[in-house]
Image (cartoon, rainbow, N blue to C red):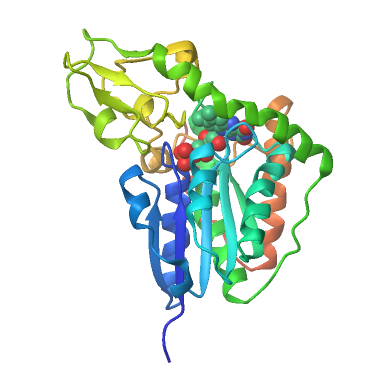
Amino acid sequence: MKNKKVILYYFSGTGNTRLCAYHIAEHFKSLGWDVTLFEYFYNKINNIIDPSDYDLIGFGYPIHAFNPPEVFYKFLKLLPICNKKYFIFKTSGEPFALNSASSYKSYRLLKRKKYEYIMEHHFIMPYNIMFRYKDEVVKQQYMYLDPLCNMLVKRLANGEIDKPHFNLFYIFVSFILRIEWLAPKINAPFCKIKPYLCNECKICLNSCPTHAIYINKNGQIKFNKNCSLCMRCVMNCPTNAIDFGIMDTWKVTPKYDFEKIKKDFTVPDYYINANTKGYFKLFYKYFKKQDELLKKYNIKIEKTERKNLGL
Ligand SMILES: Cc1cc2nc3c(=O)[nH]c(=O)nc-3n(C[C@H](O)[C@H](O)[C@H](O)COP(=O)(O)O)c2cc1C
């Protein structure tokens, strides 16, 4: 019998959604599926892999202002009509219910193109804009990532189907907030490189997924309106040499080192718990819901904390 085939099309700025894609891919592989990963990169869009060759399609994106990044929505527009089942995996920094409306516009578009929605999973990952999450929160989010991907794949492989449900008010708010799609175009001309910090490694230039960074006639690094505000350049710059224009104070650097944080036994496993107050209380609700799902599918979370360190 032929192996089943799944393709994961995704966009990722700073790596969170890519990480989800990798974990989802590994779980499919462990069930004997053939997996193809298609990460959005500007020079790949003229050569999009045809989804009709696959049994299942996954679409992944980071939530930007309660919507997918515009660049990813435009990518979906390029896909051919295809009568295949698909699921969504999306990441965001906040657990707000409003994030649930982010897939509505894509859902409508894909429906018009005959794609059949089966489910989506929303992963809360470290914030890559405005403020940095502390290691305790990052560790907990990372600990849940692989078990949740395992659960998602189990559900998909079992042939489970969820009904899409969207809240009208949230759809309206996310529609208004789509104004954020203008922000990169406004911000790009204000972005520049601080020459006294730049080591000319060109990581920003070579890794920009939308080709928004270029070298002008005078040899200077410049930004154009292709910017998707994904924050990859900012987060990956080894010398913090990028002045991110109007949004400079929203930079989050350096990259989150998930494996290092996971191995750091001084960081507790379950920082967010029933006694958590304030903003992070919302995260407790999220983790509690994920715990219930994982229990239902008999998936355990691997603890990393060493007992009685005496620290
Ligand atoms: C421009 C921008 C807007 C964002 N808007 C939201 C948002 O509306 N809600 C949210 O929870 N997180 C938001 N985030 C955080 C990201 O969704 C989150 O960090 C995500 O996991 C990043 O994924 P990536 O590393 O694959 O790009 C935003 C990030 C950026 C860069």
Residue at the spot 83% in from the left edge and 38% down from the top edge: 169
Percent of width and height locating residue 88 = 59, 56
Of 134 and 66, the residue lying toward us: 66
Residue at the spot 49% in from the left edge and 58% down from the top edge: 79
Percent of width and height locating residue 231 = 43, 29
Is any part of residue 116 visible from this angle? Answer: yes
Whether 230 is drawn above or below 183: the answer is: below
Image quadrant of ligand 1? top right
Whether 244 is drawn above or below 264: the answer is: above
> Going by the image, does 194 lie left or right of 191?
left
> Residue 13 is drawn in which quadrant?
top left
Residue at the spot 81% in from the left edge and 45% down from the top edge: 167
Percent of width and height locating residue 278 = 73, 25
Whether 123 is drawn above or below 9: the answer is: above
Of 210 and 199, the residue lying toward us: 210
Of 54 and 266, the residue lying toward us: 54
Is any part of residue 276 visible from this angle? Answer: no
Percent of width and height locating residue 223 = 34, 21
Q: Quadrant of the N terminus?
A: bottom left
Of 26 and 272, the residue lying toward us: 26
Residue at the spot 33% in from the left edge and 34% down from the top edge: 211
